[in-house]
Amino acid sequence: MKPARTSRTLVAPGGWDDLPKGEYYREALERELKPWLAKLYGFHLLKIGNLSAGIKTESCAISHQVNVSLAGAPLQVRADPLHLPFAEKSVDACLLAHTLPWCSDPHRLLQEVDRVLIDDGWLVMSGFNPISLLGLGKAVPLVRRSPVIRSRMFTLMRQLDWLSLLNFEVLHYSRFRVLPWSKQGGKLLSTHLPALGCMQLIIARKRTIPLTLNPMKQSLNKPHVRQTVGATRQS
């Protein structure tokens, strides 16, 4: 398996308009996100990356939403996503809408998200599926010039493994939009062959489990010992 970290320079798109059929991707992701946005709650939502900033999240109950990126618009905080300028456990939810495909170090990014999220905080992340028509496009010389095809694509199972190492509980994952060039994304194919969807979504929550186990107290066995000793004396 290739390492997730790369030394090559990755230039993230300024918005969904910079991607071929970008508006189709954005609309499909918003439809998939809609049932979950209403379940997010808290005080602060970080939308990391230019594409995250372009996702409509008005239906989310979290009112304070901050767009974080190195460049682009709309932008509230200019910062490197690999070095978020926020205190530990200060954010209730993070949105990584297609942020990993243009990230040079996905592990570092997820560690930063884990650092700033509160206990039981929400993580919403999406990306392109390599086991799809987009993934096959990497083998076609003329097609792989597209910025979407050139982006990094990670399998769903690999991302789930990363989250498990950080102790995230995955509540939902899905693949959708089989046909990338169609506005409807191949609705019939997406229903019957969701595994071939060119987009994937993961909803997870940060869980905290104590690493130190409390030993059983010896007093729990004392009544049993007393009964045994009493029975011996009576005999």
Image: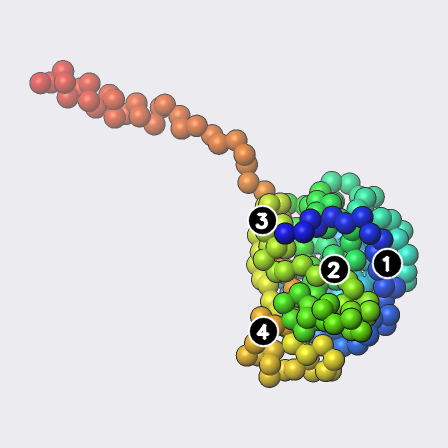
Mark 1 → mark 3, Cα distance in angstroms: 28 Å
Residue that appears at 74% across and 48% down: 5
Q: Which mark is residue 152?
A: 2
Q: Which residue is mark 4?
A: 194
Specify the quadrant of the image occupied by residue 61: bottom right
Q: Are marks 4 and 3 in contact (CB under 8 Å)?
A: no
Report how many numbered discs are placed on residues in the image.
4
Q: CA distance from mark 4 to mark 3?
A: 23 Å
Q: Nearer the viewer, mark 1 or mark 3?
A: 1
As drawn, the label of residue 11 is: 1
Contact flag, marks 4 and 2 (Cβ < 8 Å): no
Give whichever of 156, 28 is nearer the camera.
Answer: 156
Numbered disc in front, either 4 or 1: 1
What's under tag 1, amino acid-wise?
Answer: Val
Residue depicted at 72% across the width and 77% down the height: 180
Q: CA distance from mark 2 to mark 3?
A: 21 Å
Classify mark 3: residues with Cα within 10 Å, few (<14), some (14-19) or many (20+). Answer: some
Give the distance between the C-alpha atoms of the residues marked 4 and 2, in whole angstroms: 21 Å
Query: Considering the numbered disc 2 on the image, is that residue within a helix, a strand or a loop?
Result: loop
Q: Residue at x 48, y 32 (%)?
A: 213
Which residue is at the far top? 233
Comes first in the chain, label 1 or label 3: 1
Q: Give the secondary structure at mark 3.
A: helix
Q: Quick check: 18 above or below 41?
A: below
- Viewer-proximal residue among 165 and 38: 165
User: Is 16 placed left or right of 207 in the picture?
Assistant: right
Classify 175 as above or below 102.
Answer: below
